[in-house]
């Protein structure tokens, strides 16, 4: 699936649409994503700030999807665990940026080359319009090379 199609799908997907989550960027190389949570009457908590579940939901699938698409079909990739720390009340539009670098991908490939499972914690901060941190989210992602791909390097695997 092309990133533009997935981004459009996310923006029409009822859990994101009704929570006020909007994917503003999903790069062609699956290395970067940017997501916003827009304040709406239905996604505010009792005291008028962003509902914590919406803050978490806006960050939920992105590390897994970026890693899965960047590594390709030779890997199993699943979300394993998560944690969120609320730093300050979120008001207005908040955003989170996901940046998957070469060093992280290289470490994953090396750790899973023999078929071993690899668990990696990846952080993302939810920030407000002033760039101040509203929440810190950590996602633990499970990665394992598929049995059919073990014993080959990503460069030598058939296309």
Image (tube, grey):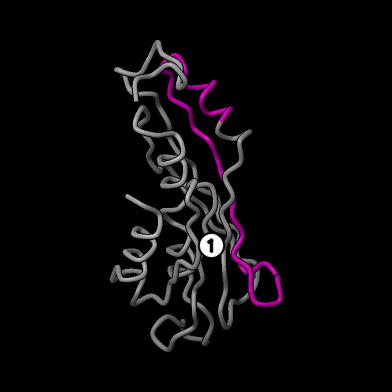
Q: Which residues are magenta?
A: 106-134
Compare residues 17 and 41 and report the one nearer the observer.
Answer: 17
Q: Residue furthest front?
A: 159
Q: State whether residue 11 is above or below residue 145.
A: below
Counting from the top left corner in percent of width and height, residue 154 is at 45, 22
Task: Identify the residue at image location x=35%, y=66%.
Answer: 8
Counting from the top left corner in percent of width and height, residue 65 is at 41, 47
Q: Quadrant of residue 10?
A: bottom left
Q: Quadrant of residue 100?
A: top right
Task: Identify the residue at image location x=44%, y=45%.
Answer: 81
Please, what secondary structure does the residue beneath circle 1 have? strand
User: For this view, does 129 lie left or right of residue 76?
Assistant: right
Q: Give the total number of marks visible in the rendering.
A: 1
Other residues around mark 1 within 10 Å, as few (<14) / some (14–19) / many (≥20): some
Q: Is residue 127 magenta?
A: yes
Q: Residue furthest top?
A: 151
Q: State whether residue 28 is above or below residue 133.
A: above
Image quarter in which the C terminus is found: top left
Q: State whether residue 123 is above or below residue 93.
A: above
Compare residues 75 and 82 and report the one nearer the observer.
Answer: 75
User: For this view, does 80 lie left or right of residue 27?
Assistant: left
Q: Is residue 143 magenta?
A: no
Q: Which residue is mark 1?
A: 34
Task: Identify the residue at image location x=43%, y=24%.
Answer: 117
Counting from the top left corner in percent of width and height, residue 92 is at 57, 83
User: For this view, does 101 lie left or right of residue 50?
Assistant: right
Compare residues 21 and 91 and report the one nearer the observer.
Answer: 21
Counting from the top left corner in percent of width and height, residue 12 is at 31, 71
């Amino acid at each position: 699936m092309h990133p533009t199609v997935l981004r459009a799908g996310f923006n029409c997907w009822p859990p994101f649409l009704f929570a006020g989550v909007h994917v503003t960027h999903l790069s062609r190389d699956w290395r970067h994503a940017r997501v916003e949570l827009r304040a709406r009457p239905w996604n505010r908590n009792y005291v008028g700030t962003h509902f914590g579940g919406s803050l978490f939901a806006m960050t939920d699938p992105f590390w897994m999807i970026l890693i899965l698409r960047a590594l390709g079909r030779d890997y199993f990739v699943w979300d394993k665990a998560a944690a969120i720390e609320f730093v300050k009340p979120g008001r207005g539009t908040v955003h989170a940026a996901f940046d998957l670098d070469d060093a992280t991908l290289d470490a994953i490939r090396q750790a899973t080359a023999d078929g071993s499972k690899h668990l990696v914690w990846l952080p993302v901060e939810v920030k407000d319009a002033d760039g101040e941190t509203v929440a810190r989210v950590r996602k633990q992602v499970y990665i394992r090379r598929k049995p059919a791909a073990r014993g080959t390097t990503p460069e030598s695997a058939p296309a």
